Image: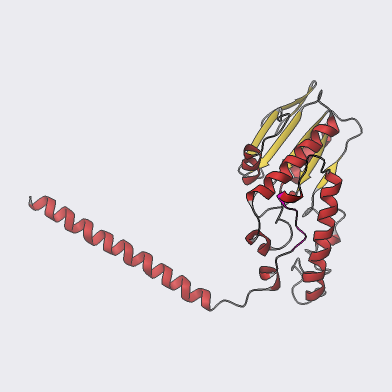
């Protein structure tokens, strides 16, 4: 009986200690947060031109999706880039025009959706990046497929590649609509006789699982890291592996 009482007493004080430690951590973090600097412009501005599920139809093309993106990134320029101005002390600020991290400095802006078309198409692959990411995260994977004769479409999911605040005003249905459009585009581009592969990075794999695609991908790979192995995708006698 004494042993049970001692065990209960020990458990009681253990719970009290755990709750005290947890409460202390929360309070310390709360006080630390109050000492942080003010939120920057890109933390607060939500862009209005973003693609929504309500924009989707079975006739929506990838080119139309890109036109929506064009308007979105023009809005980003007006509301963020032009107000912040040219690169000053912080040469690595992606929102400062002309900085070393300014996406416009590069031939391809990998914050945006893009496609690569080989001379002889052996199959097609849709690349879907993860949460808070952009098409850039799967660039190396796309290069492998492209070199093996695959048509590559890397889709930018809505609320990504622009400003962090965009993720406060987006729904999972918006992502599903973008993946559905992109899947249909790849299928139309390569035809029914060629393999259609999908590579989903983290949340990007979940988006495909949630989305009803017709016809379905012939090969699906889900990555937890940009350097994970992905499964085999066969184009005739050509196998694409990593």
Residue 189 visible in the snapshot: yes
- The quadrant in which residue 217 appears is top right
Q: Is residue 216 above or below residue 42?
A: above
- The quadrant in which residue 165 appears is bottom right
User: Of 140 and 236, which appears nearest the observer?
Assistant: 236
Q: Residue at x 73, y 32 (%)?
A: 197
Question: Which x, y percent locates residue 229?
Answer: 65, 36
Asked if the magenta segment contains residue 3, the reply would be no
Which region is colored magenta? 48-53
How many numbered marks appear?
A: 0
Magenta region's main secondary structure?
loop
User: Of 135 and 57, which appears nearest the observer?
Assistant: 57
Q: Residue at x 44, y 73 (%)?
A: 28
Furthest residue toward right: 119
Q: Residue at x 65, y 59 (%)?
A: 167
**Left or right, 129 with reference to 81:** left
Q: Is residue 38 above or below residue 98?
A: below
Question: Which x, y percent locates residue 48?
Answer: 75, 63
Question: Which x, y percent locates residue 76?
Answer: 79, 65
Q: Is residue 66 above or below residue 94?
A: above
């Amino acid at each position: 009986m004494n042993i049970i009482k001692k065990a209960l007493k020990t458990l009681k004080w253990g719970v009290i200690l755990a709750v005290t430690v947890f409460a202390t951590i929360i309070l310390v973090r709360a006080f630390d947060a109050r000492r942080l600097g003010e939120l920057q412009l890109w933390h607060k501005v939500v862009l209005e031109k973003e693609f929504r599920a309500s924009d989707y139809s079975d006739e929506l093309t990838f080119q139309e999706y890109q036109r929506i993106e064009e308007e979105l990134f023009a809005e980003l320029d007006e509301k963020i880039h032009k107000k912040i101005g040219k690169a000053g002390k912080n040469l690595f600020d992606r929102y400062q025009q002309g900085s070393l991290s300014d996406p416009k400095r590069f031939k391809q802006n990998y914050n945006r959706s893009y496609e690569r078309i080989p001379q002889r198409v052996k199959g097609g692959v849709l690349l879907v990046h993860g949460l808070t990411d952009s098409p850039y995260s799967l660039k190396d994977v796309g290069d492998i497929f492209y070199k093996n004769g695959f048509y590559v479409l890397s889709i930018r999911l809505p609320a990504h590649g622009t400003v962090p605040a965009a993720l406060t005003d987006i729904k999972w249905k918006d992502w599903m609509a973008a993946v559905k459009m992109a899947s249909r585009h790849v299928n139309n581009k390569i035809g029914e006789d060629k393999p259609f592969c999908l590579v989903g990075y983290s949340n990007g794999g979940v988006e495909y699982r949630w989305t009803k695609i017709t016809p379905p991908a012939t090969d699906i790979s889900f990555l937890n890291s940009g350097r994970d192995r992905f499964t085999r995708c066969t184009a005739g006698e050509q196998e694409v592996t990593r």
